Image (tube, rainbow, N blue to C red):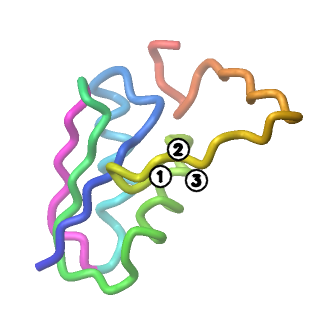
Amino acid sequence: MSTIDLEVQGMSCGSCVNHVTQALKPINGVDDVTVDLQSGHVRVSGTFDAGADQLVSALTAAGYPARLAGVRASPSPINEPAAAPTSGRGGCCCH
């Protein structure tokens, strides 16, 4: 069994937890999804062979940008402005 830990953005309530879980559960080989809402971490366990890319893609498509936990995002180039935060990420009822 494999376990992948992800950092997921945009989660703020129980509805978000359900959306994240529903985005990951249908992926072939995913057996369990554990969401820690407060820390923004999601642990996925199962026998999937596709690795983290498929999990990250599913979450991003659901409106929850994600990356492997502990992996730093590359810094923005100095000449490019940082992206403005968006509201209503993930279709959450709280935003």
For residue 32: magenta?
yes
Mark 3 packing: few (<14 Cα in 10 Å), some, or many (20+)?
A: few
Label 1–label 3 contact, CB within 8 A: yes
Mark 2 packing: few (<14 Cα in 10 Å), some, or many (20+)?
A: some
Q: Quadrant of residue 68?
A: bottom left
4 versus 76 height, above or below = below
Label 2–label 3 contact, CB within 8 A: no
Percent from the top left, x then y, of residue 88?
59, 21
Residue underneath mark 1:
59
Residue at point 32%, 86% (across, down): 49
Chain part drawn in magenta = 29-37
In what element is the residue under mark 2? loop
Q: Which mark is residue 89?
A: none
Percent from the top left, x then y, of residue 78?
81, 34
Residue underneath mark 3:
61
Percent from the top left, x then y, of residue 3?
18, 67
Label 1–label 2 contact, CB within 8 A: yes
Q: Say which label, 1 or 2, has the lower sequence index.
A: 1
Q: Which mark is residue 65?
A: 2
